[in-house]
Amino acid sequence: MKTPEQGSFQVARRRGKAAGRRVAPWTTMLPRAADGPSLRLVDLDPKTAGPGRTPLLLRMIAFCTFAVPSSMVIAPIGAAGTVPLMLATGLFVLWAASSLLGLHDPVGARHPGRVGLALLLVATSASYVGLYSGWTGPNTEAARASADRWVILLLASTAVIFVATETLRTINDVMVLVRALLAGGMFCCLVAAVQFFLKVNPTEWIGNVMPGFTYNGGDTAFQNRGPLLRVAGTTFTPIELAVVCSMLLPLSIWRGLYDTVGRKWIHWAGAMLLVFTIAVTVSRSGVLGLTVGMAVLIPFMPAFARSWTFVILPIVVSGLFLSIPGLIGTIFSALTPEQGDPSITTRTNNYPRVEAMFQERPILGLGPGNYTPTNALHILDNQYLNATVTMGIVGLLGTVAYLAIPGIAAYLAARAARAPALKCFAASVAAGAVVGTVCSLTFDSLSFPVFALAYPLMVGLSGSAWIMTRNEKALVDKGES
């Protein structure tokens, strides 16, 4: 009996041969309108689904986003010359070329997250044209370079989102990508642990074994907060590290519950390592992200897992506070800032500046990626304000749609899904995406390289959850198994 993957592959292959062309490598699992759902109900259970098939390049992007320091670039390319961004840009070239040649149908994998991406692409294009035409301000070389970097990032993100939703069709397809994503995240957390305990920066050692790459700056590996030294791992700042770890934690919990490959204690150790890393960043954004993510995920977890969560969570928190002297006091002081706290006043003091810049260019802003303050006190620390300044009201609407719709879509998929593994997966993606949405209020998230590529992976996973849930409903309605 043919598996769903084999049947889909043969359909795509016959169509490719009939047209006298080769089939794109990721279209072997892409459902066509005439084929109906590309899975069986057994494909929604990791124990009965076939082996996962996820493009190698997509897995490499997921791993390298966290494992390779984004401060290391190829000098002639500049800030866009990081390893994960170059891989994602290459993926865009392959995906776009195969689409233009008719090797696959990019329109077939429909999901709400694409609406948010489309709105952001439209806003970026309008602001980009406005910059180059001189409508939005000085058309300088530096301004054009910043806009070009933003466009490259957005095209790379587009490829990640589309390829993920076109290829991840079963629960084990998703699991393969999540393993790669969490492997990179675990490496980042181990780097953070070395930084915290030994007060040395392993990212410098990594940079020394990357021939052809140069240090581009922009990262802050260590920051003092009270008696503790905050760390950043392979990310740019402790805030970014806290937020992306909060995004990964729900997926790590889902993997611990349902992954049939590997040792369970290793899976759960990875989840504990993420919690530890969030704690040692001593970040309000991390606490916010952890709270929001678990609030979204817990109601969709299996009953036994919910029960154990309320037993284990206090033990983990107590263990962290007892094992790291000064942690409880530092976190408490961070969560209860005194009047005049500089990390808060710096943000609020920028509001009049943002209002003035918005009134000057309200529709298209300064141009995409073109808010580059030379004074650290002028950093906005809010992605929505950053979008308002750089792309105007059009860009703000596109950014809100891009950051909000995928989490909402995944949440709705979790409510509609019937298979336990699919329901919990959709909820874990919703949790991670919502963390990104909420925490973008606390830092200019899309200006940070790890978050900027980790979030498109969440959008792609949201699309897969949506499509699998839709196909599950179609199969149930037909009475198929």
Image (spheres, rainbow, N blue to C red):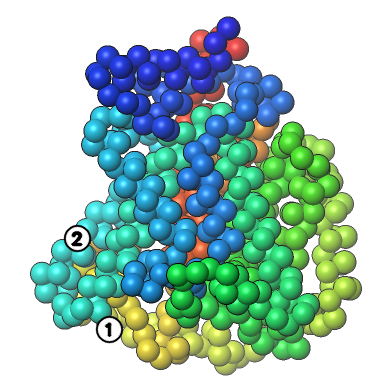
Describe residue 395's horizontal placement relative to residue 421 as left or right: left
Identify the residue at image location x=41%, y=69%: 74
Describe residue 418's horizontal placement relative to residue 368 as left or right: right
Residue 103 versus residue 84 in the image, above or below: above
Badge 1 element: helix
Residue ID for mark 1: 356
Which quarter of the rendered picture does the C terminus lie within?
top right
Residue 65 versus residue 233 in the image, above or below: above
The residue nearer to you, when weighing 299 against 162, is: 162
**Would you say the residues marked 2 and 1 are in contact, meaning their CB atoms lie under 8 Å apart?**
no
Amino acid at the residue labelled 1: Ala
Kindly indicate the quadrant of the structure image that contains residue 186. bottom right
Query: Residue 360: percent from the left, percent from the top?
Result: 20, 80
Amino acid at the residue labelled 2: Ala
Identify the residue at image location x=48%, y=87%: 346
Query: Residue 426: percent from the left, percent from the top?
Result: 58, 39
The earlier-in-sequence mark between 2 and 1 is 2
- Callout 2 crowding tier (Cα within 10 Å): few <14, some 14–19, many ≥20: some
Badge 2 element: helix
The residue nearer to you, when weighing 98 against 412, is: 98
Identify the residue at image location x=22%, y=58%: 125
Residue 437 versus residue 175 in the image, above or below: below
The residue nearer to you, when weighing 288 against 376, is: 376
Residue 126 numbered tag: 2
Identify the residue at image location x=17%, y=71%: 131
Q: Is residue 58 visible?
A: yes
The residue nearer to you, when weighing 257 against 179, is: 179
Residue 286 versus residue 312 in the image, above or below: below
Q: Is residue 403 visible?
A: no
- Callout 1 crowding tier (Cα within 10 Å): few <14, some 14–19, many ≥20: few
